[in-house]
Amino acid sequence: MFIFPAVIAILVGFIGLRFGNDSPEAYGLGSVEELFDEEISDEDIDAEKNNMSEKELFVKYILKKGDLTTATLFCKNFLIYRTYRY
């Protein structure tokens, strides 16, 4: 019953990941901060200065922040409980 919409969603997701993953700089535009007149965050400056990988960024700014990790685990456990309950 839900297989057909799920297949369509997966196909749209793969197409989006394949063709929608460029940055504005790849198309000759400025950075996102320049386009929307925002300040460059301290985290971006730190990441550029230290040449941090995506894994290092994830560990430093997400896993080591207790509130984010707790909220993520709560949401994950809530969704798993709800899925198997019904």
Image (cartoon, grey):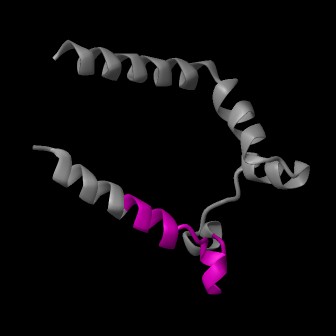
Per the rendered image, the range of residues in magenta is 13-31
Q: Kindly identify the residue that appears in the image at 66 percent across and 77 percent down.
A: 25
Q: Quadrant of the C terminus?
A: top left
**Where does residue 16 sit, x and y in percent of width and height?**
43, 66
Q: Kindly identify the residue that appears in the image at 83 percent across and 55 percent down.
A: 48
Q: Nearer the viewer, residue 30 or 83?
A: 83
Asked if 37 appears above or below 29 in the picture, the reply is above
Asked if 83 appears above or below 40 in the picture, the reply is above
For this view, does 53 lie left or right of residue 20? right
Q: Kindly identify the residue that appears in the image at 61 percent across and 62 percent down.
A: 38
Asked if 9 appears above or below 62 in the picture, the reply is below
For this view, does 23 lie left or right of residue 70? right
Asked if 37 appears above or below 51 in the picture, the reply is below
Q: Quadrant of the N terminus?
A: top left
**Where does residue 32 sit, x and y in percent of width and height?**
60, 68
**Where does residue 8 sit, x and y in percent of width and height?**
25, 59
Q: Magenta span has 55?
A: no
Q: Nearer the viewer, residue 5 or 24?
A: 5
**Where does residue 66 sit, x and y in percent of width and height?**
61, 18
Q: How many marks?
A: 0
For this view, does 82 lie left or right of residue 57? left
Question: From this viewpoint, which residue is outermost toward the bottom?
Answer: 28
